Image (tube, rainbow, N blue to C red):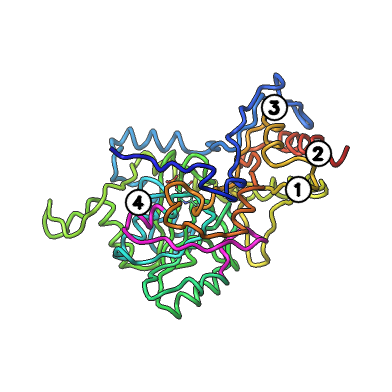
Amino acid sequence: MLQGTELSLEEMGELAAIIPASDPEVRVRYNTIPNFDRPSRRSIIPVCEPTLGGNEAKYVLQAIETNWISSAGQFIRDFEAQFADYCGVKYGIACANGTVAMHLAMATLGLEPGDEVIIPTFTMIATANAVTYCGATPVLVDMEPHYWQMDVEQVAAKITPRTRAIVPVHIYGHPTDMDPLNELAQKHGLMVIEDAAEAHGGEYKGRRTGGLGDAAGFSFYGNKIITTGEGGMVTTDNREIAQLAWNLRDHAFSHERHFWHKFVGFNYRMTNLQAAVGLAQLEQLDDFVVARRTNAQAYTELLQDIPGIATPQEAPYAKNVYWMYGIMVDEQVYGMNRDQLRRVLADNGIETRTFFIPMHCQPVYWRQFKGQRYPVAEDLCKRGFYLPSASSLPLDELKYVAKVIREACPALG
Ligand SMILES: Cc1ncc(COP(=O)(O)O)c(C=O)c1O
């Protein structure tokens, strides 16, 4: 039987100090959240939630009424075409979730055991797993400290004769610095696959994420900027990648005859029902991005003068879509550490989430990356967490979150 990898704190040594405490229980402190501008309806503020205020129900009903509920149908075709268009590319390949979108994109490269794919260590584990599913080896780089993205300057040193691809991940909705990365990839003949799971609508120098490399993978999980419940999409301008991805997504059925297969394919299909939700969500994406950027600006204004709280920065080249609004806590200056502050927030009905635990600290990858250290990612993991960030987060709730952080600050007495 499969056994999970156990990793003791002793074995982790110094790295044990960066691992977050488990999530505090969010308590109902008030019957309703104390409000500022208008009565609030709820007693707990979730870290994220879907915003389903458009044509979702209407389109789903249409799919049911027309009997197209499986993985063919007009909503799939429209969602693929319109999402690709939104990203500024020709092709969209809808699939079951963001993890398999990344796997599909990488599978089209024909990676072999021993091939290497460079990824940031500070990411959600699906990025690394997609490489592993292909039998290839993830190779890690650290983050830059300003925008918390892959440090592109460190990538060159990790390129070897076995390197096949580079995967920038637009962490928390802020695009990676793509020009130098693409230049490097071109020089070495490498593919660039964006992990855009968290960055719908993000922009790099005026160009949308999903169209900044050879291919990209998006997630439409329930906490993403647009959602299909579960779902994902590969986007690309490359016809060959698109056709292979469509084929591999659907068991690699051959066009020559039925039940004839030239590849080990997958069933990674999205249903027409999910695409119906996706299309309705896509119609609202621009509004969601405006709402997130407005909320981020409000958070930053309310938090930036609190000692020991660092708010997220936006690079001059970037349009950050703030999938999650993250902050960093300096224990010495603020007066308590990240986990203690999360506890205070939870006691006041506010759900939060810690930043990612880097890949080199994961039990399952521990032996593979043993002895490697990535100080920026480790610092992010130790001190970072994100605040309620839904597109529909009301301003009065956001102000309440900021007020709790301010009033909890021991340094402000
Ligand atoms: C950076 C990143 N990549 C990939 C994924 C995987 O997406 P999904 O959960 O839809 O499989 C996520 C999801 O949370 C993510 O944050």
Q: Is residue 42 left or right of residue 52?
A: right
Q: Element type at marker 3?
A: helix
The residue at 79%/31% (across/down) is 36
Q: Which residue carries the number 2 mark?
A: 409
Q: Element type at marker 1?
A: strand
Residue 308 is inside the magenta segment = no
Q: Position of residue 287 (x, y in %)?
A: 60, 47
Q: CA distance from mark 2 to mark 4?
A: 51 Å
Region in magenta: 129-152
Q: Element type at marker 4?
A: helix
Residue 263 is tagged as none
Residue type marked 3 = Asp
Asked if residue 42 shows in the view, the reply is: no
Q: CA distance from mark 2 to mark 3?
A: 15 Å
Q: Position of residue 18 (x, y in %)?
A: 61, 47
Q: Element type at marker 2?
A: loop
Q: Are marks 2 and 1 in contact (CB under 8 Å)?
A: yes
Q: Quadrant of the N terminus?
A: top left
Q: Which residue carries the number 3 mark?
A: 347
Q: Which residue carries the number 1 mark?
A: 309
Residue type marked 2 = Cys
Q: CA distance from mark 2 to mark 1?
A: 10 Å
Q: Quadrant of residue 257?
A: bottom left
Q: Position of residue 293 (x, y in %)?
A: 66, 50
Q: CA distance from mark 3 to mark 1?
A: 19 Å
Q: Which residue carries the number 4 mark?
A: 77
Nearer the viewer's eye, disc 2 or disc 4? 2
Q: Are marks 2 and 4 in contact (CB under 8 Å)?
A: no
